Image (cartoon, rainbow, N blue to C red):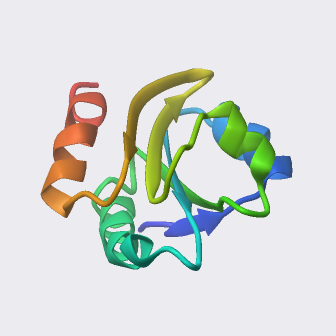
Amino acid sequence: MSEGVKAITDAEFASEVLQAPGPVLVYFWAPWCGPCRLMSPVINSAADTYSQRLKVVKMEVDPNPVTVKQYQVEGVPALRLIQGEKILVSTEGAISKQKLLELLDPYLNGH
């Protein structure tokens, strides 16, 4: 059963993402971002699809400038697949569910 998508802050980033035992998909978004509304169901679907192998978190960009700067988020929606300190996948802009699954599959099904 999926835990769903957890909202996190700068203060929680290290414990929720960097210290997680497996890969974490970080979804950077903003309430004023139209394309982000399109991405939310895609992100939720990925959380359900990969619930056993992937943790999915979301971070609102405006109240969390430290992580946004550290991970060079230029625009929203943005995605970073992170394992430990390493960025495995980095995208900006809205993408389809199919495209997201294609990006994640090599890291989640190859193990």
Q: Is residue 60 left or right of residue 53?
A: right
The residue at the point 40 percent across, 73 percent down is: 40
Q: Is residue 79 left or right of residue 109?
A: right
* Residue 55 x, y percent position in the rendering: 50, 50
The residue at the point 22 percent across, 34 percent down is: 109
Q: Is residue 109 left or right of residue 17?
A: left
The residue at the point 53 percent across, 44 percent down is: 74
* Residue 54 x, y percent position in the rendering: 43, 46
Q: Is residue 69 left or right of residue 63?
A: left
- Does 20 appear above or below 100? above
Quadrant of res 6: bottom right
Considering every residue shown, the one lying at the far top of the view is 86
* Residue 100 x, y percent position in the rendering: 24, 51
The number of numbered badges drawn on the structure is 0
Considering every residue shown, the one lying at the far right of the view is 11
Camera sees residue 62: yes
Could you tell me which quadrant the C terminus lies in?
top left
The residue at the point 59 percent across, 33 percent down is: 21
Quadrant of res 42: bottom left
Q: Nearer the viewer, residue 58 or 53?
A: 58
- Does 59 appear above or below 92? below
* Residue 38 x, y percent position in the rendering: 32, 76
Could you tell me which quadrant the N terminus lies in?
bottom left
Camera sees residue 23: no
Q: Nearer the viewer, residue 87 or 16?
A: 87
- Does 66 appear above or below 110? below
